[in-house]
Image: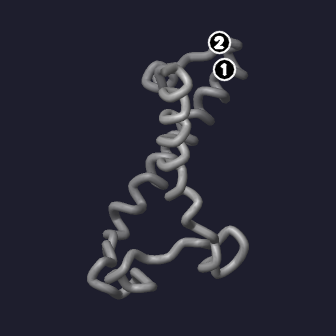
Amino acid sequence: MRTLITALAIGAGALLAVPALAYDGTKCKAAGNCWEPKPGFPEKIAGSKYDPKHDPKELSKQSDSIKQMEERNARRIEAAKKTGKFEYDVTKLSAN
């Protein structure tokens, strides 16, 4: 009985693993570049109805916030070098 259950478990595992072997990688454009669109979608997204057309202002928000963060960090480091004490709160630095 135990052998039968073990054999069934191994058989079920092998049956579930078969779909993973179905992809043979023959549709790759180059080594490691195997992306292909789903059926019904265009090859290129830009200019199609699926193009998200992001707003440049929205896209620049992250780079602006990173620039502001770097400026704050530079002020913190400069103040730490002068005073020997690191202060996280930038509003306290401008009061000095």
Q: Which of 7 and 76 is in front in this view?
A: 7
How many discs mark residues in the rendered view?
A: 2
The residue where tag 1 is placed is 80
**Residue 29 placement (x, y as % from top left):** 64, 81
Label 1 environment density (alpha carbons within 10 Å; few <14, some 14–19, many ≥20): some
- Would you identify the image quadrant in which residue 82 lies? top right
**Residue 79 placement (x, y as % from top left):** 63, 24
Relative to 44, does residue 52 appear above or below in the rendering? above
Residue 29 horizontal side relative to residue 57, left or right? right
The residue where tag 2 is placed is 85
**Residue 41 placement (x, y as % from top left):** 35, 81
Q: What residue type is labelled 2?
A: Lys
- Marks 1 and 2 sit apart, C-alpha to C-alpha, by 5 Å
Residue 92 horizontal side relative to residue 41, left or right? right
Residue 67 in view of the camera: no
Q: Give the residue at x 44% y 52%.
A: 62
**Residue 2 placement (x, y as % from top left):** 52, 20
Asked which secondary structure carries label 1, the reply is: helix
Asked which secondary structure carries label 2, the reply is: loop
Specify which label sits upstream in the sequence, 1 or 2.
1
Relative to 22, does residue 75 appear above or below in the rendering? above
- Would you identify the image quadrant in which residue 20 lies? bottom right
Label 1 close to label 2 by CB (< 8 Å) = yes
Q: What residue type is labelled 1?
A: Ala
Q: Give the residue at x 53% y 49%.
A: 17
Q: Nearer the viewer, residue 60 or 54?
A: 54
Relative to 92, does residue 59 appear above or below in the rendering? below
Residue that lies at the very extreme toward the left in this rendered image: 49
Residue that lies at the very extreme toward the front in this rendered image: 1
Label 2 environment density (alpha carbons within 10 Å; few <14, some 14–19, many ≥20): few
